Amino acid sequence: MNEKIRILVAEDHLVARVGVVTIVNMQPDMTVVAEAANGNQAVEMFRAHQPDVTLLDLRMPGMGGVEAAIAIRSEFPGAHLIALTTYGGDEDIRRALAAGVQAYLTKDVLHDELLKAIRAVHAGQTYLPAAVAASLAAQLPRPDLSAREVQVLGLIVRGLANKQIAFTLSIAEHTVKNHVKNILSKLGVQDRTQAATAAIQRGIIHL
């Protein structure tokens, strides 16, 4: 009898967490050794149990999944991590992969896909479902927005006009206009509405 794959599940929604734990514990080759409801707990539980595979929800109160992944990997470089999220935007995926997760699953994946991902990551492979891989491949190159442009984009998403953005960031209105022009060109869109839509869809800005 092989050793079971020991799994940590970090997910702040109780129902979702119970669902994942139940599916995993029904597998003959897997067992959940710890559960966490936020990123800080995930890091503590990882330290305490050193699981084979960790499922990390990316959106958790306090420390999110990406921060937790970075924290875990800095202490345990060999950690096997799977991101679980409701978001499939290419920037979200890139951020998670950059933080060291080996698999990225959106929460609507089927049970067998989740189990396949756990086994693959446990075996040292990377696992990206077709939809996620397509989302990464189909996307334009990553828009290299400056930190200030990301701030301006965030305010465009919130519906602020140039004058209000200038006021909020304490910069001149013509500076805002230049930022907006750069943002549209970098995102490959025609106007502010398209910029806002692209920003949300691609996970550059989160509401």
Image: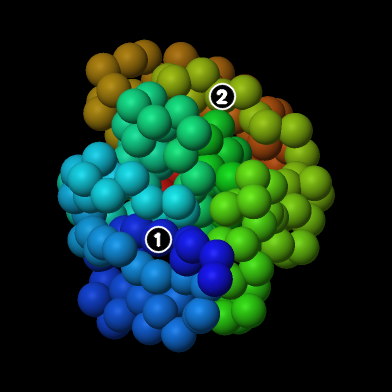
The residue located at (24%, 76%) in the rendering is 14
Marks 2,1: beta carbons within 8 A = no
Residue 138, position in %: x, y?
Answer: 80, 49
Mark 1 surroundings within 10 Å by alpha-carbon count, few (fewer than 14), some (14 through 19), many (20 or more) = many
Say what amino acid the circle numbered 1 marks: Ile
Residue that numbered label 1 is attached to: 7
| 3D distance between C-alphas at marks 2 and 1 | 37 Å
Q: Quadrant of the N terminus?
A: bottom right
The vertical placement of 139 against 4, above or below, is above
Residue that numbered label 2 is attached to: 145
Front residue of 200 and 6: 6
Mark 2 surroundings within 10 Å by alpha-carbon count, few (fewer than 14), some (14 through 19), many (20 or more) = some
Residue 128, position in %: x, y?
Answer: 69, 55
Front residue of 84 and 178: 84
The vertical placement of 116 against 87, above or below, is below
SS at mark 1? Answer: strand
User: Residue 102 has which mark?
Assistant: none
